[in-house]
Amino acid sequence: MKKTLARCGLFCLGLITPVFIAACYGVSYGFTMLGRVIDAGSKGGLAGIQVSCVGSRNGTDEVLSTTTSAGDGSFSMEYRPTTDCETLRFEDVDGADNGGAFQTQEKAFDGEQNVLIELQPKA
């Protein structure tokens, strides 16, 4: 009888421990979005493009997370489904440093994890 109670107690402790740890430290349930920003004309990668995840909170747009494209135009951004990311904004923040100034572009975000965006040069 004591062995049965001891086993039952250890079993319950084994079930409760992960829940306790998750309650104390939180649960990671994010995703990684990968993408590439390219020049619409040359199809070459664009460095220094700011990629922002934008959501609407209380009727105003709010930037929820931001990253910058690497030398080949690639980028990665962590996001969580609960952050209400509605739009991806691609903005040339360094101007001529990446070969010319490019137009800002926005794309509706639908949870896709691989994004390819082509930016047009500014006129």
Image: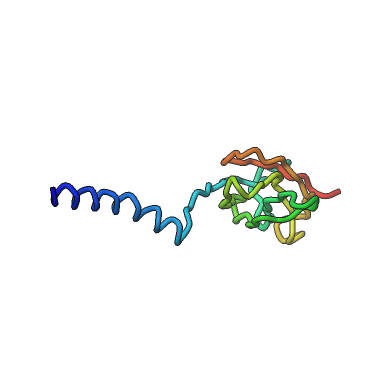
Front residue of 21/85: it is 21
Colouring chosen for the image of the structure: rainbow
At 69% from the left and 47% from the top, the residue drawn is 88
- Left of 25 or right of it: where is 116? right
At 65% from the left and 46% from the top, the residue drawn is 44
Front residue of 90/22: it is 22
At 74% from the left and 52% from the top, the residue drawn is 57
Q: Which residue lies furthest to the right in this view?
A: 123
At 71% from the left and 50% from the top, the residue drawn is 54
Residue 71, by quadrant, is: bottom right
- Left of 19 or right of it: where is 115? right
- Left of 20 or right of it: where is 58? right
Residue 80 place in picture, x, y as percent: 57, 49
Front residue of 47/108: it is 108
Residue 58 place in picture, x, y as percent: 77, 52
The tally of labels here is: 0
Residue 83 place in picture, x, y as percent: 63, 50
Residue 98 place in picture, x, y as percent: 70, 57
Front residue of 51/84: it is 84
